[in-house]
Image (cartoon, grey):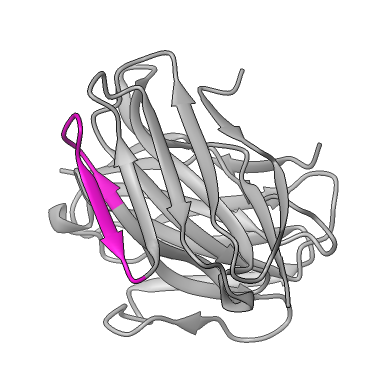
């Protein structure tokens, strides 16, 4: 079962529009990461959130972690073609007695010029 | 859906020994695979890009001779941690690119503990 629910799975927006991607867990998250992936390039680290209510920004991308630390949103303002790619949320979990990273299914973003 | 299998999920080894981690794409061919390492409470760090039939491309600061990567077939990439030291203890995870796919495919990860 997917421990991190990510939505939407696919998103097509017009250049200049704003968009939001959500990542939800049924459990409290102790470390929530946002990554971007482009085909053939691997993961690019965007931001890490740890505290309830925390918000971070990088250029036109803002990520928030809710007070309960169970939901995070990634918001892109005035999207550009360079924002296109797959956005993944990831979190630290404990499974089988040891710590590992789990990921959401990813959101494919296309930005139409 | 596409599956990437990583083995072993957990390994404990003695200092000075070598450990091999396998990453297999079970139902698709992956010309490119990626190896990541995570430090406690930190983001994943891309170590190298593994290309089938050619040498891996290592990120800056990653020791090529210590972290040997082999991508001998379209479905298998291996990461060998040579002469392991306690500071190599970490969580290692691989991912594979599938042409035309809209999502990323990750292995289950390997927790390496060097004692």
Image quarter of residue B49: bottom right
Q: In this view, does A99 lie above or below A109?
A: above
In this rendering, position of residue B68 left or right of residue B24: left
Q: Is residue A23 above or below residue B72?
A: above
The residue closer to the viewer here, A18 or B74, is A18
The residue closer to the viewer here, B67 or A6, is A6
List x then y, in percent, for residue B24. 69, 50
List x then y, in percent, for residue B115. 15, 43
Can residue B44 be seen?
Answer: no
Image quarter of residue B98: bottom right
The span shown in magenta is A48-59
The residue sitting at 56% across, 63% down in the picture is: A37
The residue closer to the viewer here, A4 or B6, is A4
The residue sitting at 14% across, 52% down in the picture is: B86
Looking at the image, the residue that sits furthest to the top is A26
| Labels in figure, total | 0
The residue sitting at 41% across, 50% down in the picture is: A34
Asked whether residue A102 is drawn in magenta, I would say: no
Question: What quarter of the picture does the C terminus of chain A occupy?
Answer: bottom right
List x then y, in percent, for residue A77. 46, 62
The residue sitting at 40% across, 61% down in the picture is: A61
Asked whether residue A51 is drawn in magenta, I would say: yes
In this rendering, position of residue A23 left or right of residue A49: right
List x then y, in percent, for residue A1. 61, 17
In this rendering, position of residue A113 left or right of residue B60: right
Image quarter of residue B99: bottom right
Can residue A11 be seen?
Answer: yes
């Amino acid at each position: 079962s997917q421990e991190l629910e990510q939505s939407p799975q696919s998103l097509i927006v017009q250049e200049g529009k704003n968009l939001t991607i959500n990542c939800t867990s049924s459990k409290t998250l102790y470390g929530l990461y946002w990554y971007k992936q482009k085909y053939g390039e691997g993961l690019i680290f965007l931001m890490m959130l740890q505290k309830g209510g925390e918000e971070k920004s990088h250029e036109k991308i803002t990520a928030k972690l809710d007070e309960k630390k169970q939901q995070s949103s990634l918001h892109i303002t005035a999207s550009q073609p360079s924002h296109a790619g797959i956005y993944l949320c990831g979190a630290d979990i404990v499974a089988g007695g040891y710590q590992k990273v789990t990921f959401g299914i990813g959101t494919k973003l296309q930005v139409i010029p | 859906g596409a599956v990437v299998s990583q083995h072993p999920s957990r390994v404990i080894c003695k200092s000075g020994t070598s450990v091999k981690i396998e990453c297999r794409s079970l139902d698709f061919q992956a010309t490119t695979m990626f190896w990541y390492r995570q430090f406690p409470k930190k983001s994943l760090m891309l170590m190298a890009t593994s290309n089938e039939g050619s040498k891996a491309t290592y990120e800056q600061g990653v020791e090529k001779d210590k972290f040997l990567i082999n991508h001998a077939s379209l479905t298998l990439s291996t990461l060998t941690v040579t002469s392991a030291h306690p500071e190599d203890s970490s969580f290692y995870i691989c991912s594979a690119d599938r042409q035309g796919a809209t999502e990323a495919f990750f292995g289950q990860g390997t927790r390496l503990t060097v004692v």
